[in-house]
Image (cartoon, grey):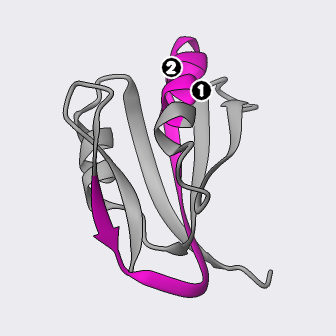
Amino acid sequence: MTQSVVPFAGTNQFTHGQTPALPGMAQGVYITILPSAVDELVEQYSQWFAPYPEIRIVDHGTSDKQHLGFILCEWIACEIDRLFLTWLDQDERVGDYTVYGRDLED
């Protein structure tokens, strides 16, 4: 089990939970947002994830066709914290998201 970041609803404070380890795997989340919210959320997530080397912001920007804002985050060798996904469900700036998994050997 590894530590994970769980935002406390509506604030920049966190609690620490445990997520199951996924040796040799990464889980990621592709988050779509308004382009105007990209910089704000990247800054917020960067602060939240800074103490946790297993969580990375892989990329951010706008999509090519519809110019939607996006942030791509990965959890290395552990599952994404379900409370983070709940936070995404409740954040009005988040239009949608999808979770994926991949082998780290790829």
Q: Position of residue 102 (x, y in %)?
A: 63, 77
Q: Secondary structure at mark 2?
A: loop
Q: Nearer the viewer, residue 46 or 58?
A: 46
Q: Is residue 82 above or below residue 23?
A: above
Q: Is residue 1 above or below residue 43?
A: below
Q: Secondary structure at mark 1?
A: loop
| Residues drawn in magenta | 16-45
Residue identified by numbered label 2: 34
Residue 49 painted magenta? no
Query: Are dots 2 and 1 in contact, CB under 8 Å?
Result: yes
Q: Is 1 left or right of 30, judged from the image as shown? A: left
Q: CA distance from mark 2 to mark 1?
A: 6 Å
Quarter occupied by the N terminus: bottom left
Q: Residue at x 39, y 32 (%)?
A: 95
Q: Residue at x 59, y 38 (%)?
A: 71
Residue placed furthest toward the right: 106
Q: Residue at x 33, y 27 (%)?
A: 12
Dot 2, how many residues are within 10 Å of its Cα: few (below 14), some (14-19), or many (20+)? Answer: some
Q: Nearer the viewer, residue 55 or 3?
A: 3
Q: Is 34 left or right of 64, judged from the image as shown? A: left
> Quadrant of the rendered structure where residue 103 is?
bottom right
- The circle drawn on residue 68 is 1
Residue 32 painted magenta? yes
Q: Amino acid at mark 2?
A: Leu
Q: Residue at x 29, y 24 (%)?
A: 92
Q: Position of residue 44 (x, y in %)?
A: 48, 27
The mark nearer the N terminus, 2 or 1, is 2
Dot 1, how many residues are within 10 Å of its Cα: few (below 14), some (14-19), or many (20+)? Answer: some
- The circle drawn on residue 35 is none
Q: Nearer the viewer, residue 60 or 97?
A: 60
